[in-house]
Image (cartoon, helix red, strand yellow):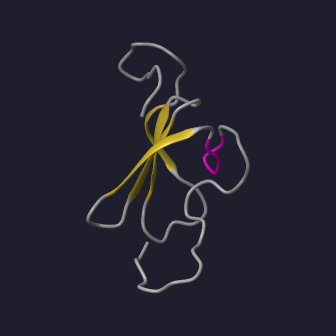
Amino acid sequence: MKWVEGAKEGIVVAGGHGKGNALTQLSSPSGIFVDTLGTLYVADQVNRRVMRWTQGDKKQSTAIVGGNGYGVGANQFSAPY
């Protein structure tokens, strides 16, 4: 991702394939973070996971934590923000 001063349009870099739980989809995204390398992290609330899109990766994301249903286990979330 790159900030372009005066840009009139953007591009979809996360989701964009309707609501769902596939690696190309989000369901109620509730928070985002972009690190210094341009990696985008999205809290996907309904799917109870945090997704990562690396710069230049336009096909799908990686679930880096959660995605295993509601719970308090080490691999679960209740509702990430």
Q: Position of residue 2 (x, y in %)?
A: 41, 77
Taking the view exactly as shown, the residue that stands out farthest to the right is: 18
Side (left or right) of 29 relative to 20: left
Was residue 24 drawn as part of the magenta stretch in this picture?
yes
Magenta-highlighted residues: 22-26
Tell me: residue 71, above or below residue 31.
above
Q: Residue at x 62, y 53 (%)?
A: 15
In the picture, which quadrant includes the C terminus?
top left
Q: Residue at x 57, y 66 (%)?
A: 58
Q: Residue at x 42, y 62 (%)?
A: 54
Of residue 25 and residue 75, the one placed in the foreground of this image is: 25
Of residue 10 and residue 75, the one placed in the foreground of this image is: 10
Q: Position of residue 27 (x, y in %)?
A: 63, 38
Taking the view exactly as shown, the residue that stands out farthest to the top is: 72
Tell me: residue 60, above or below residue 44.
below
In the picture, which quadrant includes the N terminus?
bottom left
Q: Residue at x 56, y 57 (%)?
A: 14
Tell me: residue 5, above or below residue 65.
below
Of residue 10 and residue 37, the one placed in the foreground of this image is: 10
Tell me: residue 44, above or below residue 38.
above
Q: Position of residue 39 (x, y in %)?
A: 37, 61
Our reading of the magenta stretch's main secondary structure is loop
The quadrant in which residue 9 appears is bottom right
